[in-house]
Amino acid sequence: MNYRGGGAPKNSSLRGKETGFTLAEVLITLGVIGIVAALTFPSIIGYYQKKVLKEQFKVAYSMLSQLLLKSEVDLGGKAECYYWDVNPYGSSVCAEYDSRGGCTKYELSDGSPLPSNYSGNMSECKELSQSAKEMPIKKAVYLNMRGMILFNK
């Protein structure tokens, strides 16, 4: 019988000898496998990260939906807690400065005082924030004073 492994001469007599791959063949094969892995690994990681981000977004969206539904039940309707897209009162100017030059009091450009809802209607923001803190969820969702939605891990 003539058993021939990688790198063995064609006409050799192999009785009693074991054959195999040479070190060079093994290293070349490992090099090719490494190059293929290096080329495909970033795309696999990117796909996984996108999938994780998508799932995290779904969870956040679900929590916000639950928060809004709970606040509607608690408050008897939609919460009045928002900033204006376009301020209907116009711009404000500084009326008083402190000793360091920082503004301590603002007023409208015509000299009248700022209305209580100058930045938006914030009348029920505390109630909405309280509803969020009472939700039995793994991550706490709440609104800060600027109306931004924050998540605690």
Image (cartoon, rainbow, N blue to C red):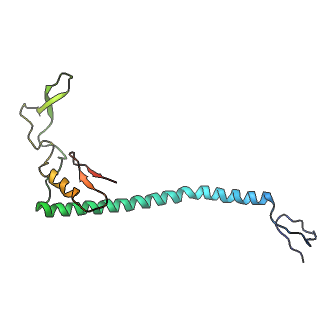
Instruction: Name the residue: 22% across, 48% down.
Output: 147
Q: Position of residue 26 (x, y in %)?
A: 75, 60
Residue farthest top in this picture: 99
Q: Quadrant of the N terminus?
A: bottom right
Q: Position of residue 98 (x, y in %)?
A: 16, 24
Q: Which quadrant of the figure has residue 96?
A: top left
Would you place residue 103 above or below residue 12 in this image?
above
Q: Nearer the viewer, residue 104 or 35?
A: 104
Would you place residue 92 above or below residue 10 in this image?
above
Instruction: Name the residue: 34% across, 62% down.
Output: 58
Q: Position of residue 111 (x, y in %)?
A: 7, 30
Q: Is residue 45 left or right of residue 29?
A: left
Instruction: Name the residue: 14% across, 56% down.
Output: 79
Q: Quadrant of the C terminus?
A: bottom left
Q: Which quadrant of the figure has residue 29?
A: bottom right
Residue farthest bottom in this picture: 1
Instruction: Name the residue: 19% across, 58% down.
Output: 131
Would you place residue 34 above or below residue 10 in this image?
above
How many marks overall? Answer: 0
Q: Which quadrant of the figure has residue 73?
A: bottom left
Q: Position of residue 12 (x, y in %)?
A: 93, 68
